Image (cartoon, helix red, strand yellow):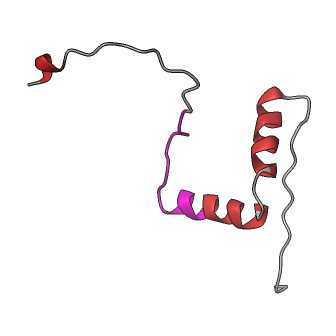
Amino acid sequence: MPRMVKKTVVFNMEDPDQILLHEHANERKNFSGYVKRLIQRDREGGYSVAPVKISSVENRAINVKSFI
């Protein structure tokens, strides 16, 4: 087996979801290391569901007395 193996990731620039993934990937200085960490996390049983980013939060009053 060769000392180094190169794998290619393809992003479909006509798919809005993949465009966002591509933009996120481009923010990384070390894309190869980033992908390797994702693979390692997956092997170790990391996120079973992708985390959700909340874009906005409503201001709500919370009655803390009901929690005590």
User: Which quadrant, please, contains the C terminus?
Assistant: top left
- Left or right of residue 14, residue 22 in this image: left
In this view, the residue in front, 50 or 60, is 60
Q: Residue 43 in magenta?
A: yes
Q: Quadrant of the N terminus?
A: bottom right
Q: Residue furthest left?
A: 68
Q: What is the magenta range?
A: 40-52
| Residue drawn at (12%, 17%) of the image | 66
User: Is 20 rendered above or below residue 7?
Assistant: above
Name the residue located 69 percent from the left edge and 61 percent from the top edge. Answer: 34
Up/down of 16 relative to 12, above or below = above
The quadrant in which residue 11 appears is top right
Which residue is nearer to you in this view: 17 or 2? 17
* Quarter of the figure with residue 20: top right
Most common SS among magenta residues: loop
Direction from residue 40 to residue 23 in the image, left or right: right
Relative image position of residue 40 (x, y in whole percent) = 58, 65
